[in-house]
Image (cartoon, grey):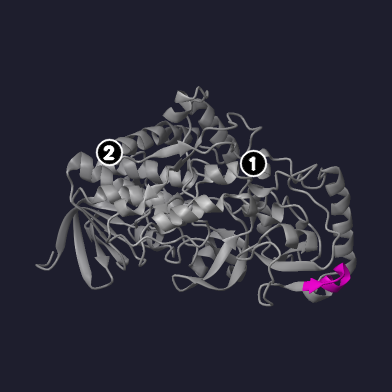
Amino acid sequence: MTTSDAERDVVVVGSGVGGMAGALTAAVEGNCSVTVLEKAPVLGGSSGLSGAQLWVPANHHMQERGIDDSPEQAAAYLSDLAGSFYENPDAARWFVEHASEAVTYFEDVADLSVQIIEGIPDYHTHSPGAKDEGRYLEPQPLDSAEIPDWAELPDSPHLPGGVTTTEILEWGGALTPGSWDWDTIQQRREDGIVTMGTALIGYFLREAETHDIDVRTDAGVTGLITDGDEVVGVEVNDDERILARSGVLLNTGAYDWNDAMVENFEGTPSEDVVSAAVPTATGDGLRMAALEGAKLGVYPPVGGAKGFFIAVPDREFLGAPLYRYCYNVGLPHALAINSDGERFCDESFYPKQASEFYDPTGEYEEFPYYMVFDETYHEKYGIGNYRPGADYPEEFLAGKAETLAGLADQLDVPADALESTVSQFNEYAREGTDPDYGRGENEWAHVWCGDPDHEPNPNMGELDEPPYYAVRLYVGLSSMSNTGLVTDRAGRVEDWNDEPIDGLSATGSVTAPVEWGVGYQSGCQNARSLTYGYLAGLDLAEK
């Protein structure tokens, strides 16, 4: 230690929901002094950009409404998602047992206000332990005047501010914004009422101001400081050292914006992979912890939260190109094709898409992918940054033609294959069934990726109205990775001897998805990050 080294009880690296949860718990339970260091110029990390869904089984809001649930049912559900080889019932059970505890804790100490997201089922409603409603929680709207003036929070480029997910579903669905109550949304925006990820992080920042929690932006941690085998602090921006008397908590996100890690861990060409995560998600936590002997949990890149993304022209976020989810491929009058001009997956349900994105041979001859849609889609639904009926700029479209053959020529795919693909799909759409890939069979896909007013299937409609359009599709990540640090039940990072590394904890997507293996369920990442941030905070407070 030098005379210029700062000292705090706890240093948190990353200001996502898990980092803020750990900081607040340590401050409340241990009266700890805490410094939170955020690499980006804004706070919240990728969870701050998200819809802030929290998947919390057996929560007390369910109990109050008489919805039956238990940790046993939830653990069975997660184990089924994980696959028989990768399931870890003990880890799943530990998470679900403590998720509700963590939410209740923050409702008490931080006045975190959450509500059940109405009308949305678990992803896999036919899996053991699944529920039709109640496990998804979200923050209630928060007046931004209650968030400290110094807190720099982003406006998510992916989701609309001023509306809750419950309202979106009540007003007609996630992909039919024309039916939303825009008067209410606009009034909230004018009144400074924030929702989703901004609200979630805002609740924690509001409470942080009442404790000895110092929160900094533009503070990139470049290395861990060790004393023997113990982590005792961090290096900041290569020219500052902060020592941590109790320990360091990593909440740095995944590696979405690190091409080398993407190719190594996802096994997919980086030029075909994009991300909705904050651009500072470059694998820093993995790198720093690995240098200190941390164990990595590695799962095959056939699951997780990967899905179709599109580029948004002339838009950036924090200096990086902007990409957005394209759940729109699951709407009627649209489908996805590969470079052979053929369908290859259930376009309405992204958990089924991830395995199709991965080619174990490394050839990837089916890239690139395209979303193909017709004029009916163009007039009824939006896409990317464009409302229904909008003029698309040339740089947005990969092709537009009066015939499918003409479109195929522009995309350099076989015309006969594309025409046959669309013809077969149209037959299925008229019947409302998809015997090839099961599109439109999933209840969650009906709610989130479909048009509830379209019959006979909310996810299927014919492509028969020219002109025809195509947009390039990418493999999309959102700071939910297949590889991460392995932690114990207190969130302490383990080494390759399965022993905790003294002074180092982690939470969020920098950690391995041991609870759900190669599966995923929306809301798990935020909920697990919050839960292990809470558990790590308790452990740090004891020190």
Task: Farthest residue to the left: give it.
Answer: 3
What amino acid does circle 2 point to? Val
Of the pair 511 and 500, the residue shown nearer to us: 511
First in sequence: mark 2 vs mark 1? 2
Which residue is at 85% across, 71% downward? 402
Viewer can see residue 427 = yes
**Secondary structure category for the residue under label 1:** helix
Of the pair 461 and 70, the residue shown nearer to us: 461
Q: Is residue 322 magenta?
A: no
Res 3 → quadrant:
bottom left
| In this view, 58 is above or below 199 | above
Q: Return the x and y of residue 410 as percentages of the image width and height.
A: 80, 76
Task: Farthest residue to the bottom: give it.
Answer: 394
Rendered-image quadrant of the C terminus: top left
Q: How crowded is mark 2: few (under 14 residues within 10 Å), some or many (20 or more)?
A: few
Res 2 → quadrant:
bottom left
**Secondary structure category for the residue under label 2:** helix
Q: Return the x and y of residue 122 as percentages of the image width and height.
A: 59, 37
Residue picked out by circle 2: 109
Q: Do the residues labelled 2 and 1 touch (CB within 8 Å)?
A: no
Side of 308 relative to 504 (left or right): right
Residue picked out by circle 1: 444
